[in-house]
Amino acid sequence: MIFIWSTVLVIGILVFVHELGHYLAARSVGVRVEKFSIGFPPRFITLTSVDNGFDVTIFFFRFLKGSLSWKPIINTHINLKDRIGTGTEYVVALIPLGGYVKMAGALDESLDTIITNAPDEFMSKSTPQKIWILSAGVLMNIFTAFIIFTGITYYQGIIESSNEPIINELIVDKPAEKAGLEKGDEVFSINSERVYKWSDLSKIINSLPDSQIEMQILRDGEMLEFSLGTTHYLIPGDNGIDTIGVIGIRPEYYYSSVNFIESLTYGYNGIINSFGMITLTFKMLGSGQASLKDLGGPIMIGQIAGETAKAGWIPLMNFMALISINLAFLNILPIPGLDGGHIFIILIESIIRRPLSLKSRMVIQQIGMVFLLGLMVTVMFNDVSRLFN
């Protein structure tokens, strides 16, 4: 159950804020929005903005002519006197894992070719206005991550670690625990090299992955000797992935409070670091240090969301911020079908000073949809493979 609700929460909120960005930006420059939908079909609830209120329809299963069909079961009207309707249909679909904003006169995933060049259509707007509308979803995802990172820092404070070489925690089934080290032990030396600070300890152990080491430990005033083997851990480095030695011990961590202005700085740094991690991933894919098999999709996101939810709200919110940055990065790539692809086409049109033909735009859009479908199949295959391995 935690897997389901955490996945719906993370993906549902992030998709909503992304599409809300497109919706608000479109409305801000006078583009008519025909549909604002959250979730994958079938429709569950629709609210259509009409004069003097909203028309509401609720869908569910009905028996019609001996067969079970998904049909409207309730039609009603919410009366708001003197309200001027926009004609926008607001949809909450049954599967809360996607979203869609349909703007008048926009050639998008729906491949709708009805463009009349009316003043309230997307194609009638200036290049800066089009780019503003198309980039607003990405900006909303970045802003959401910034708010989360900032809020967590302000609420929790900045995590810092003690530099004393005293073991505060042992990780289960790691070399240190198996060798008999205990919480409160003070590391005196490693391989006859004196240890004065935790940073000394880390430097020595990190430089010796999968190696045998000798440790002298002070416990209750008594000097003890331990022989154990390190294991290894992979971390991002300047040249890709570095392999470091670890034995499964942690120092004491504590939080120091920060003011609101300081938390804003850490919120900004959180965004920069997240983009740095994504850039490193692409560098690794390009260099062969990582492969397409390492990519994950909705199932992998759900698994991690479930694990972080078990750890508490703060880890879950941190994960949501990271996924929000990932969505922003992927959507701004100049791939047909994504926001960045649409922006790229608009920039080309502004350079050549004429619009591409409708046929050309549709071909480009279809190529993008095929690419995205192939990517989706790949990540779903990877997700399912991980489940069985």
Image (cartoon, rainbow, N blue to C red):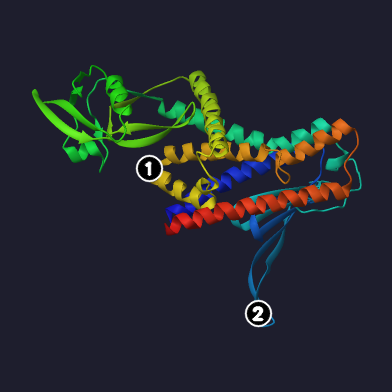
For label 2, count other residues whose C-alpha is less than 10 Å away and answer few (under 14), some (14-19) or many (20+): few
Judge left or right: residue 56 versus residue 195.
right
Secondary structure of the residue carrying tag 2 is: strand
- Whether residue 145 is visible, yes or no, is yes
Farthest residue in the bottom direction?
A: 66
In the rendered view, tell whether residue 231 sits above or below residue 55: above
Any mark on residue 311, and which? Answer: 1
Residue displayed at 58% across by 37% down: 286
For label 1, count other residues whose C-alpha is less than 10 Å away and answer few (under 14), some (14-19) or many (20+): few
- Whether residue 27 is visible, yes or no, is no
- Which of 236 and 318 lies nearest the eye of the viewer? 236
Label whose residue precedes the other's in the sequence (1 or 2): 2
In the rendered view, tell whether residue 86 sits above or below residue 385: above
Any mark on residue 67, and which? Answer: 2
Q: Position of residue 62 (x, y in %)?
A: 64, 74
Quadrant in the picture for the N terminus:
bottom left
Callout 2 amino acid = Ser
* Rendering quarter of residue 333: top right
Residue displayed at 52% across by 21% down: 265
In the rendered view, tell whether residue 167 sits above or below residue 199: below
Q: Distance between the Cα atoms at labels 1 and 2?
A: 46 Å
Callout 1 amino acid = Ala
Q: Position of residue 382 (x, y in %)?
A: 52, 53
- Which of 343 and 19 lies nearest the eye of the viewer? 343
In front: label 1 or label 2: 1
